[in-house]
Amino acid sequence: MIRSELLQVLSRENPELRADEIERAVEVFFDEIAGRLATGGRVELRGFGAFSTRAREARKGRNPRTGESVDVPGKRVPYFKAGKDLRGRLNG
């Protein structure tokens, strides 16, 4: 599912809301998750899962074009752990 499909489903399920209201709500939802993760926080949606970040260590990489060794700096990456209810729906 892509963002536009999500907006269509929400519009269909909530005909009392205007499309721009739904779009703004989805935008705020994603912005809040991204903002919390950017500050090192965690976002937990009970029954669905939890978003957090994980640290990736610096490592040696290789330029695929030249074969030259390059240093890849450490960074933080987003991580999602599915909740018990979501795992249950997928597997049973």
Image: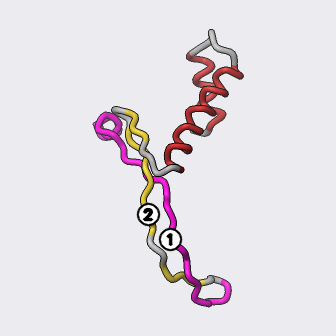
Residue 64 placement: quadrant: bottom right
Residue 22 vertical placement versus 17 (above, below): below
The residue sitting at the right extreme is: 20
- The x and y percentages for residue 34 are 55, 44
The residue under label 1 is 74
Say which quadrant the N terminus sits in.
top right
Q: Nearer the viewer, residue 8 or 56?
A: 56
Residue range corresponding to the magenta coloring: 65-92
The residue under label 2 is 55
The residue sitting at the top extreme is: 16
Numbered mark located on residue 16 in the image: none
CA neighbours of label 1 inside 10 A, class few (<14), some (14 to 19), many (20+): few
Residue 38 vertical placement versus 77 (above, below): above
The residue under the point 66% across, 89% down is: 66
Q: Nearer the viewer, residue 70 or 32?
A: 32
- The x and y percentages for residue 4 are 66, 34
Residue 50 vertical placement versus 5 (above, below): below
- Disc with the residue nearer the chain's start (2 vs 1): 2
Q: Is residue 21 left or right of residue 57?
A: right
- Helix, strand or loop at label 2? It is strand
